[in-house]
Structures are given as structure tokens and as C-alpha cells.
Amino acid sequence: MSRSLTICDRQQAASLRRQTLRKGILLLLSDLFRLTDWELVIHLVDDREMTPLNERFLSHQGSTDVITFNLDDLDPATKTGMMRGEIFVCVEEARRQARRYHTSWAMEVMRYIVHALLHLQGYDDHDPADRRRMKRRENRLTAQWSRLIAPESIGSVRKAKA
């Protein structure tokens, strides 16, 4: 059994409470995803780091919210229990989307992490029917997770310097 979770915070948009976020992610993995084995690295980054990743690996211009790399050799749709991956979350994008969707940046970060974990479990969002199925599961899991750990507990927005 392997349980490894690394959180790397290289962004300046928010002041994160990494230990609180870590505890929340561990609850998400064990209680909501019901996983027993995982090896995950979650990078919290800014636009400057996300943009070249998005352009190189997804051939999309500019930044994006989350990029997931499945590091497991097995087909994610058929594996049981083990999850291995690397996730890049753009906190600046979370702040922008939070304003657009009238939510908090922390709730957006939580949503992006759930979204990435669903990809690691084999969910896909390219086809409209698959996207609706994934979005329903994402909404349900994000709501459940936000009842276990309050989004505002994971950090606060950094004020821009004058």
C-alpha cells in the first residue's frame, strides 16, 4: 500500500495553508473517492508556469485551470484502488473563474482538484455526454468535500502590492 501526497506551491496569488489543504485532500481521497493507494503530486502554479504546459502538452494557447498527467501504466478505466498522477492547478485562473461564477477562488481550486482526480479515474470530458456525466460527479464530489473542509480554511487571497 502506497500513500504519497506532495503539494508544491509556486504561486503568489494566494496565501495557502498547505497543511489544511493536505488534510482536506487526504479526506477527499480516502472518504469520497474511497481509494486505498495513491501517489500524487499537486502543483499550485501561476499563469507564467501554466501557459507553457498548456501550449506544449494540450496545444492550447494561454493558461488554463488544471492539467492532469496520469502516471499509471494501467488503463485508468480498469484499475482498482491505485491512483498515480501529477496535477497542475492555476490559482490565478481560479481567482478569475471565481469572479465569473460568483464563488470563491478556494472553491474553484477544490473543484479543479476533484476534476483532475476524476480524469485519473478514467473520466473524460471531450464528448458532450461524457462531459455531462463527469460534471455531475464533479459537482457532487466538490459539494461533499466542501462540507468536510470549508474552502475558506485553505488560504486567503494575497493583496496586490501598490
Image (spheres, rainbow, N blue to C red):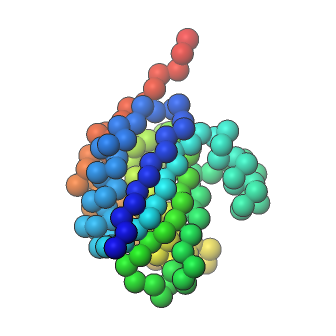
The percent coordinates of residue 98 (x first, y second) are 47, 43
Image quarter of residue 67:
bottom right
Q: Nearer the viewer, residue 49 or 108?
A: 49
Image quarter of residue 58:
bottom right
Q: Nearer the viewer, residue 127 or 49?
A: 49
Q: Inspect this view and state whether residue 100 appears.
A: no
Left or right: 108 in relation to 74: left
Left or right: 153 in relation to 135: left
The percent coordinates of residue 119 (x first, y second) are 51, 70
Tell me which residue sits at (61%, 78%) in the image: 127
Residue found at the very far front of the displayed protein: 1
Q: Quadrant of the N terminus?
A: bottom left
The percent coordinates of residue 51 (x first, y second) are 70, 46
Above or below: residue 126 compared with residue 107: below
Above or below: residue 13 compared with residue 41: above
Above or below: residue 65 compared with residue 17: below
Residue found at the very far top of the displayed protein: 162
